[in-house]
Amino acid sequence: MIKVKFIIWTIFLSLVCLNCFPQDKKNAVVLELAGKSFGYFDISYERYLSERLHFGGGIGMSGRSQLYYNGGMFNRYNFSIPLYGAYAFGQRKHHVISEFGTSIQGFTGPNGTLSFDGQILFISFGYEYKGEKFIFRAPVYLAYVGSNEFFPPVMPWFGLSFGRLF
């Protein structure tokens, strides 16, 4: 049900804001530290549909460990794939931004196999500076991690983003 609501809101916001504001730079590459991938860092590509609305996707690194498997050793890499949308409130260089999306969690196994073991839904609110060629963001995330023994079902998270418009 949550996925259906997410798709409906995404389509609605896309249709409403497609031609809200003309702009020259419609793409961005963003490096985020401890952000929406819920790992060490992620690198994302963003496509702006309007001055206020953009969608993005990327890949993030969560960790590396050495594991033993059938008498051999292999490196296991934990990664995530954040898929998200964002809306900026305000037309100036300094404004509030909200992001919403999911981060698909995965890892590599022996012989380079890929496995996916869940997803984390998130929403964020924070500060964004958007200049002519540079983006800086400082969002606070609320991530739904579900019921577990260690964390509450909704966990706060903080990230820092640096990006380049082109």
Image: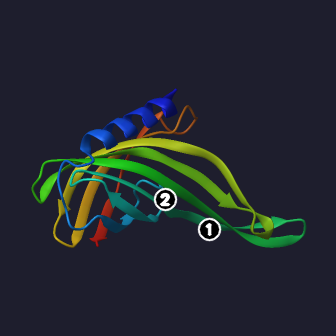
Q: Secondary structure at mark 1?
A: strand
Q: Which residue is mark 2?
A: 39
Side of 1 where 97 appears, left or right:
left
Quadrant showing the C terminus = bottom left
What crowding class fits label 1: few (fewer than 14 Cα within 10 Å), some (14-19), or many (20 or more)? few
Q: How is the image coloured?
A: rainbow
Which residue is at the far left? 92
Residue depicted at x 57% and y 64%: 63
Side of 27 where 93 appears, left or right:
left
State the image coordinates of residue 151 (x, y, percent, origin top left). Answer: 50, 38
Q: Which residue is mark 1?
A: 64
Q: Quadrant of residue 10?
A: top left
State the image coordinates of residue 60 (x, y, percent, origin top left). Answer: 50, 63
Q: Quadrant of residue 93?
A: bottom left
Q: Secondary structure at mark 2?
A: loop
Three-letter code, disc 1? Arg
Pick the front one: 78 or 68: 78
Looking at the picture, does residue 125 appear above or below residue 48? above
Badge number at residue 132: none
Three-letter code, disc 2? Gly
Q: Quadrant of residue 47?
A: bottom left
Q: Which comes sooner in the sequence, label 1 or label 2?
A: 2
State the image coordinates of residue 95 (x, y, percent, origin top left). Answer: 15, 52
